[in-house]
Image (cartoon, rainbow, N blue to C red):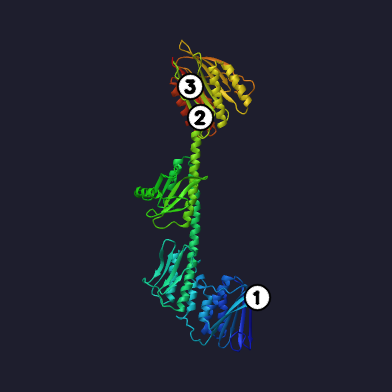
Amino acid sequence: MLDVDSSTVETGTVPGHIDTQTHIRRVRLPSGHSTPAVARAFVRTALVESSLTDVMEQALLLTAELSTNVVRHTGSNLDLEVATDWRGVTVTVGDHSPGGLNPAPPDEGGYGLVLVDRFSHSWGVHHHANGKAVWFRLETQDSPGTPPLTPDSALAAVEALLNVDPEADLDETAAEYAHRMLERLAEWLPAESGAVLLDTGDGPTTLASFGPPIDEWEWDAALPLTRPWSGSLVLGVPQSAHAMVLTRLAAERLGLALERQRLKHTDDQRRTWLTFVAEASELLAQSLDPALTTALIPRLVVPRLGSWCAVYTVDDPSSPQLATAAHSDEAELPSLLSTLEEQLKHLDVTDWLTPLAPPTEGYLIPLAARGQRLGLLAVGRHEDHRHHPDELEVLSDLARRAALAIDNARIHHERRRIAHALQQSLLPPELPQVDGLELGAQYVPIGDDVDVGGDFYDAVPMSDGRWLLVVGDVSGKGIQAANVTGLVRDVIRVLVRDGRPLESILDTLNEMLYERGGRYCTLALAVVAPCPDGTARLTLHLAGHDQPILINDSGAVTEVGAGGTAVGLLKELSSPRTSLVLRPGESIVFYTDGVTERRRHDEFFGIARLKRVLKTLSGYPAEVIAARLGSTVLGFSNEPPRDDIAILVLRNTL
């Protein structure tokens, strides 16, 4: 409920006026969006009841301005007093906000006191402990110098402009809103021309206009906008107080609408940039190849963040090298790169953003990760606009993420190179040539090519003309498994050269690995002795290893050998000896468990499938058997291998 008080006094109670019978009405209004409208209605009723309609327009205009200032600048309750007498009316608008008077100058969007001073006969300010009050006096007999409000109703014009609500249609564009505002102004002002000029940072443009353009505008009201946006409302209309009020009010309303559009656009754009940066990061992280990662960067930048982009590496800081580039117009790329090459000779890029001089017009951004300068990112401006500050932030963020992706790819590449070199050092560089015998091998490392597996094979000559074939699998993966693999391989070679028998070699290896603890190894060892009758005699020891498969000349396949315990697993080693004869045309295939345990979902390659494949390879050379078996095992599944695959084939060609 509104607190309304009405009284009549015999003597004047308004400062600065003659004694007369005065009718006073008071009301306290809560602060809110509708407060100015309620205040105007209260004043209108008081003036109608007092037959003071000839000052109605001025009183309502000034009441609206003062009440709006209270709501906007204090947010407190509003005290409104209307004192009427036979000569005129005195309106007092008070607030409950202690402090000095807020004049709300025009450049801050408020015109209350300017209008009060211009259109009232007298006015003033009361200060009290809890706030302040502004009063103005309007008299029925116009004082000299008080300008009339023309045309017929300035108040109607103000209300018409206020009714062009910038929040009414959220889907309406700023240009459409500006056109509506200019149409209302044209209705109330004798203006032949008008326009709304807007500069969003790329130069002024005409947002809306009516009438023919003129060289000099009579009125130029700045729009209250946040940098880098700026703008103005210009009108070709004779100067008058009426025109000033309406033009500034329209400019304020336009500024609110444009600010709303700007904030909405900024919010939408930032959401878009967040999505873009997240997707770009995911794409960059998916590649672990340095060249591919670098080549991806310009494709992410052009055309969204610039009309062209070039990436340079700086292995030599004094001489950046072009790695990749892209341009929205590929025909312009050669001349652009030539110009950039000359500019880079004279630029020292130390800041996050280093501007490029025309005709390139863009920025250089360092590509740095983990305290190391990796390269430079050069980006050219859009053809239709300069880079927005938000775009520059996105570019800087993208440059940081791209540099980290490149560095990760380089680290991965180096680890892969080291792993490959280490893995190759654990295998013989080439298989030996043995009269009457063929050797073929196939090795496929684990799918993660930055790790080292524990599978290996070897062919070691013995002092009496025989050969020792070795296929092994060390438990686990990585550097520790590789160390054990190298140790086992080297110890076997040393002990074979010393002439030690297989049983002694196995016992020594078992004792050594058991004492070390943590790692064990399965081994298949076969001593091969070519015989004058064209056969080859094999002495086979299996230490926890899968049985090799014998392929005879008729295509029959047989598992051979007797199982034993893995080397280093138990203190005492068990590895029975098996002797067999390899006749001409027959082959024996050694393999690691990466073959039979190759998986396709929940299905294993298995020993049965291995035998079926080898049966079809009877009679083929050893290299062909190894290669075809390896490709068949890999083709069994689309997934990368989870374990190393080692295959060694011996065939009797005598």
Which residue was labeled with disc 3? 649
* Disc assigned to residue 451: none
| Element on which disc 1 rests | loop
Q: Is residue 409 above or below residue 471?
A: below
Q: Quadrant of residue 88?
A: bottom right
Q: What's the residue type where badge 2 is placed?
A: Gln
| Element on which disc 3 rests | strand
Label 3 vs label 2, nearer the camera: 2
Q: What's the residue type where badge 3 is placed?
A: Val
Q: Position of residue 644 (x, y in %)?
A: 52, 29
Residue 279 visible in image:
no
Compare marks 3 and 1 and give the one earlier in the sequence: 1
Give the crowd class for mark 1: few <14, some 14-19, many >=20 residues within 10 Å. Answer: few
Between the C-alphas of marks 1 and 2, the distance is 88 Å
Count all numbered tags in the image, as a single digit: 3
Q: Is residue 515 above or below residue 330?
A: above
Q: Position of residue 526 (x, y in %)?
A: 53, 18
Give the crowd class for mark 2: few <14, some 14-19, many >=20 residues within 10 Å. Answer: many
Q: Position of residue 653 (x, y in %)?
A: 44, 16
Which residue was labeled with disc 2? 423
* Left or right of residue 43, residue 200 in this image: left
Residue extending farthest top: 533
Which residue was labeled with disc 1? 129
Between the C-alphas of marks 3 and 2, the distance is 20 Å
Where does the C terminus fall, quadrant-wise?
top left
- Depth check: give the residue in front, 450 or 638: 450
Residue shown at 49%/54% (left/top)? 393
Residue shown at 63%/25% (left/top)? 515
Residue 298 visible in image:
yes
